[in-house]
Amino acid sequence: MTEITTISGNRGLMLEEPLIFEQGCPGRIGVDIADPGPVDEDRLGGLARQGAIGLPDLSEPQMVRHYTRLSQKNYGIDSGFYPLGSCTMKHNPRLSEKMARIPGLTDLHPFQPQSTVQGALEVIDLLAHWLKGLAGMPALAMSPAAGAHGEWCGLMAIRAYHDDHGDSRRTRVLVPESAHGTNPATAAMCGYSVDPVPANERGRVDVAALKAKLGPDVACIMVTNPNTCGLFEDEILEIARITHDAGAFFYCDGANYNAIVGRVKVADLGIDAMHINLHKTFSTPHGGGGPGAGPTVLSAKLAPYAPLPFVVHGTDGLELVEHAEQAPGAKPFGRVKGYHGQFGVFVRALAYILSMGADGLRQTSSDAVLNANYLLASLKDVLSASFDGPCMHECLFDDRFLKDSGVTTLDFAKMLIDEGFHPMTMYFPLVVHGALLMEPTESEAKETLDGFIAVIRALAAKAKNSEAEAFKAAPRLTPRRRLDETLAARQPILRWKHGANAEG
Amino acid sequence: MSMYFTKDHEWIKVDGDTGVVGITAYAQHALGDIVYVEVPESGRELRLGGDAAVVESVKAASEVYSPVSGTVTAGNAVLADQPALVNESPEDQAWFFKLTLSNPTELEGLMDRAAYDEYVAGLE
């Protein structure tokens, strides 16, 4: 392909955009403020600015265009297909966004008298009611701010239980090899040592190996179900039984709850605690688009240790319990977050739940699984599926189909960008070589999936047809070509300095 | 000096009760470009198979496990500034740490070069 070059460096109407600091022109100003005249008294206590603070000077149209152009370079779920496995990039309904912008829910202060925020407390309470009902669990901590934070909350509750029962021998946490990296990190943060559990040849937890590692020094196990290979842990009841027989708790990483919501009550699986990623399962913006939230459901045994604050039904309406002495019998392990959790995310998640209804939620998980199996079935003759289907909400391939082609998983992903698709997750999970993990979600129409499948099939044929050079050159149609990820990691340049890195 | 290997792709060169540990050429190739290395400090007690160091590439972060039990006598400070050395000289200059072996009989559970090469060939 001939390289297209232009005089300006722009590519059509996709304009080349310098950093805002590089566009600054000293003295240029977008507003006209009257000269305040001489200041006869310093009212800043000697803290008046001593010199320039290094902000760029631009006109308002320059500013507007700068940020508009940057936004045009962004690729998000609103732009196109986003099959990033393990991330659940489903559509964010505009209704949920509208609800989150209702003035009565946005113009609040966390320290307002509770009698004036009964509606906000009802949002928290009603969402908690739904989450507990869907999970079949009796208790819930609403305040964790994201998935990993929810894991930490769950393990702190487990630790509080063991401490409360004088059981100080339990120092180990068992984590399968395919787990998200946050699982071992959480266990370590809670002061536990991490012991990995191998997978079997079917991509599930090796139950015999788990059993051999269980003992009186194990505090809990952390299992993701469906797991990061997109597979349902079909021996989960046995996993729960042997874990409980050893006196340990069963923590479930709920990152993939979107595959089973409305179909499985996690309480029926023997799970003692699980965080629910509202930003995945209940469709609130995430990634670059907004904060997450990781409410954590707890079993009856762990319920007394749930962190503050929580909402209760009092005599004069809903009440927020902020201190342990307000709740006789409770033994909260502390607080995990300032204020009451990610309230804006709660509103969106509740709007999503109420607009879906129980039947709609059941259909979302069914459709997510159907779409993933459609990808798996349509691609497994040209890619190499790591495990036999059916899969759950995501399908996993490895790089065996690229063997001797000279093309790597990374090259394949870069080529997809030129074709107008956000790549799938690469090189995770680590249990297979050169992983390609695809999660279409329920949001996508069949036409979108068919378009993606056609491109993947054609690219796989190209790779097998000794066209490695084209893959190595990708992406060719992006504002920047292949970035040097190694140099960026080894010698990161994290801030602009005047004159230091103008060109490079 | 004898050289031994683990199934997790660490190597150890042993002279008396002193060992030098690193990761194999196969390991660095599988990881890709190494961008970060964390080595243990002197005095740290390591046990056989326990976490000893951390290595990160553009693809993944991995633990490096200690092939034997012992006490760390030195970590290779050069690797913090030059992680690329692990790609360039994995089994020589890019050693991770030195240690004093507390139980040299543990070496009997490791592979020699021929056995390791055969093991790696079986992974392809």
Image (cartoon, rainbow, N blue to C red):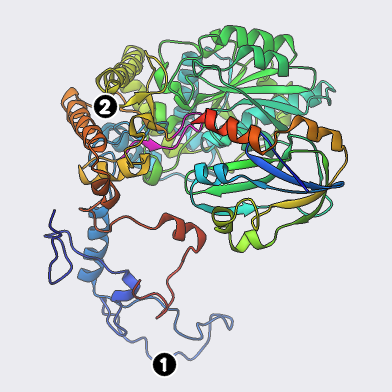
**Dots 2, 1 in contact, CB < 8 A:** no
| Between A189 and A11, the one nearer to me in the picture | A11
- Give x and y (percent) for residue A54: 42, 78
* Position of residue A20 in the picture relative to residue A449 (left or right): right
Residue B26 vs residue A91: left or right?
A: right
Relative depth, front residue between A152 and A441: A441
Q: Chain of mark 2?
A: A
Label 1 neighbour load within 10 Å: few <14, some 14-19, many 20+: few
Q: Quadrant of residue A58?
A: bottom left
Rendered position, A89 above or below A366: below
Q: Mark 2 or mark 1, which has the lower sequence index?
A: 1
Label 2, on which residue? A443
Q: Is residue A89 visible?
A: yes
Q: Residue at x 27, y 25 (%)?
A: A382
Q: Is residue A215 magenta?
A: no
Q: Are marks 2 and 1 on the same chain?
A: yes
* Chain under disc 1: A
At mark 1, the secondary structure is loop
Region of the chain picked out in magenta, as a range? A423-433
Tag 1 residue: A38
Badge 2 element: loop
Is residue A430 one of those drawn in magenta? yes
Q: Is residue A320 visible?
A: no
Q: What residue type is disc 2 on?
A: Ser
Q: Main secondary structure of the magenta part?
A: loop
